[in-house]
């Protein structure tokens, strides 16, 4: 199960896993995109794909969506908590509260709701793997990053704590922490669709969404006794959140 599979990293990850023969549950709020993506994956890879439309910010919607699953679909082996976002880029004394609420509700509470619903089945079966999509923003704060930084530092902390709770039940918990990733709607969403402000990936080569997908696939495909805790990755031209070689 990959949350936030209608675009960007989640979509690239679902595509890679479908190509490799996994049955994938793709989720997001945009139903039309999920249906189209499902048809593409079925046609291209003959993949078995289950789309689920819901908002991770709603505990009720998460629960109702999970309850639609039956048989083997209900036995989720791998949960990739990817749905997330940044909203705005303002100093803390000027930030918009609605942006803060949206980031906290999606990046932290959504991840928790999904984990709370899926992890019990993994514990009961004594096996499972949960991967949280963090960010280098969860390792290093940057100017005006404030609440986005806080949510991703939170994801880092939760990943460590979840592992302590779940390791004794045969459930692996890991994380992937990318820096700038293109082929996503991340910047467009952050700046409310303002394309001029969203051009943060110009003049250098950032990571592509499939680079992150490959890291997730690598984490999942280790022998059962190996748990990769975190993969931190950034483009070669990037040295930190703010230091980027934009010479072309
Ligand atoms: P995109 O905006 O391209 O994708 C975000 C996905 O999350 C979409 O599929 C979206 O689907 C889904 N989503 C957003 N809000 C909700 C919600 N409330 N309920 C359900 N699904 C939701 O961005 P990315 O692929 O870049 O982002 C994926 C993850 O990667 C995020 O956690 C982000 O913080 C992280 N990340 C991104 C980086 C980047 O530079 N791009 C760098 C480091 C980390 P829909 O709108 O259909 O609901």
Image (cartoon, rainbow, N blue to C red):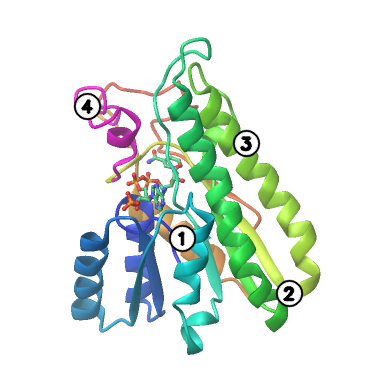
**Disc 2 versus disc 3: distance between alpha carbons?**
25 Å
Give the magenta part as a residue range: 184-201
- Whether residue 239 is visible, yes or no, is no
Q: Earlier in the sequence, mark 2 or mark 4?
A: 2
Would you say the residues marked 4 and 3 are in contact, meaning their CB atoms lie under 8 Å apart? no
Q: Is residue 45 left or right of residue 93?
A: left
Would you say the residues marked 1 and 2 are in contact, meaning their CB atoms lie under 8 Å apart? no
Q: Is residue 108 left or right of residue 54?
A: right
Would you say the residues marked 1 and 3 are in contact, meaning their CB atoms lie under 8 Å apart? no
Q: Is residue 8 left or right of residue 33?
A: right
* Disc 4: which residue: 194
Q: Where 123 falls versus 163 (above or below)?
A: below
Asked if the beta carbon under badge 3 is closer than 8 A to the nearest atom of ligand 1, the reply is: no
Prevalent SS, magenta region? loop
* Disc 2: which residue: 170
* Disc 1: which residue: 61
Give the secondary structure at mark 2: loop
Q: Seen from this angle, which residue lies furthest front?
A: 60
Q: Earlier in the sequence, mark 1 or mark 2?
A: 1
Give how far across and how far down residue 2 sits, in percent. Answer: 44, 63
Q: Where 64 falls versus 196 (above or below)?
A: below
Give the secondary structure at mark 1: helix
Q: Earlier in the sequence, mark 2 or mark 3?
A: 3
* Disc 3: which residue: 153
Q: Earlier in the sequence, mark 1 or mark 3?
A: 1
**Disc 1 versus disc 2: distance between alpha carbons?**
28 Å
**Disc 1 versus disc 3: distance between alpha carbons?**
26 Å
Q: Seen from this angle, which residue lies furthest top?
A: 93
């Amino acid at each position: 199960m990959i949350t936030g599979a209608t675009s960007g990293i989640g979509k690239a990850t679902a595509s890679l896993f479908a190509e490799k023969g996994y049955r994938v549950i793709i989720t997001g709020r945009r139903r039309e995109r999920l249906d189209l993506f499902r048809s593409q994956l079925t046609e291209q890879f003959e993949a078995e794909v289950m789309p689920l439309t819901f908002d991770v910010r709603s505990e009720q919607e998460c629960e109702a969506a999970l309850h639609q699953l039956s048989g083997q679909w209900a036995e989720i082996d791998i949960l990739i908590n990817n749905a997330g976002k940044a909203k705005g880029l303002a100093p803390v004394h000027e930030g918009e509260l609605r942006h803060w609420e949206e980031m906290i509700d999606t990046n932290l509470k959504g991840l928790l709701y999904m984990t709370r619903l899926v992890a019990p089945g993994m514990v009961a079966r004594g096996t499972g793997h949960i991967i949280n999509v963090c960010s280098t923003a969860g390792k290093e704060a940057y100017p005006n990053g404030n609440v986005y930084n806080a949510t991703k530092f939170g994801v880092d902390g939760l990943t460590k704590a979840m592992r302590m709770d779940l390791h004794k039940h045969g459930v692996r918990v890991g994380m992937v922490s990318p820096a700038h990733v293109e082929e996503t709607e991340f910047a467009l969403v952050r700046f409310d669709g303002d394309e001029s402000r969203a051009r943060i990936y110009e003049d250098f080569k950032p990571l592509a969404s499939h680079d992150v997908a490959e890291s997730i696939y690598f984490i999942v495909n280790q022998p059962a006794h190996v748990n990769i805790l975190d993969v931190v990755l950034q483009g070669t031209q990037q040295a930190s959140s703010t230091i980027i070689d934009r010479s072309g």
